[in-house]
Image (tube, rainbow, N blue to C red):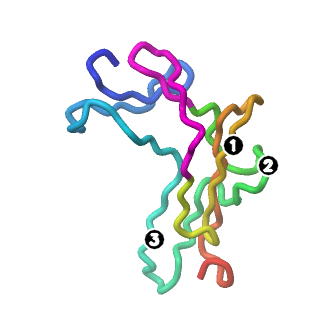
Amino acid sequence: DEDQNWALWVDETRIGYWPKSNYRARNANKVAWGGEIVNRRTQGRHTSTQMGNGHFPSEPIGKVAYISNMALYDLHMNLYDVPTQISVYVNNPNCYDIRYWRSDGPYGRHITFGGPGHDSVQCP
């Protein structure tokens, strides 16, 4: 916003707010979307916590968790041209995964993500 605070909007509803006092810099050089779980291996194995709805991102939208029409806007609400170089990071693809899609369809630039967590063979 004009006061350099950060907000996350979905349609016309603000669902997140981060005041500028949380940050030392006046701008960002990185934005991240996705999912995260805590894995303390308390039972000597990977957690059984699912990410998203527990399905891998190779499954179709409607069955997998997704974030659609991802975009960045500047202070004046002008669409910021996101570079075509998008980095995807996954630290354990046998347990969880993510895919980035650049599309002109109804989902625009979007990610699909998720996974079932613990599996005795794939995610011990």
Residue at the image point whose x is 56% and y is 22% from the top: 11
Residue 92 on image: x %, y %: 56, 70
Give the labeled residue for mark 2.
Answer: 60
Q: Which residues are magenta?
A: 71-87
Residue at the image point whose x is 59% and y is 82% from the top: 124
Q: CA distance from mark 3 to mark 1?
A: 27 Å
- Give SS at disc 1: strand
Q: Nearer the viewer, residue 50 or 86?
A: 86
Q: Nearer the viewer, mark 3 or mark 1?
A: 1
- How busy is the neighbourhood of tag 3: few (under 14 within 10 Å), some, or many (20 plus)? few
- Give SS at disc 2: loop
User: Measured along the vertical axis of the image, is residue 100 above or below residue 13?
Assistant: below
Q: CA distance from mark 1 to mark 2?
A: 12 Å
Residue 120 within the magenta-colored segment of the rendering: no
Q: Can you tell which mark lies on residue 101? A: 1
Residue at the image point whose x is 35% and y is 31% from the top: 17
Q: Amino acid at mark 2?
A: Pro
- The answer to whether marks 3 and 2 mark residues whose Cβ atoms lie closer than 8 Å is no
For residue 123, what is the image quadrant? bottom right
Residue at the image point whose x is 55% and y is 66% from the top: 49
Q: Can you tell which mark lies on residue 39? A: 3
Left or right of 20 on screen, residue 115: right
Q: CA distance from mark 3 to mark 2?
A: 27 Å
Left or right of 93 on screen, residue 104: right
Q: Nearer the viewer, mark 1 or mark 2?
A: 1
- Give SS at disc 3: loop
Residue 78 within the magenta-colored segment of the rendering: yes
Residue 4 on image: x %, y %: 29, 23
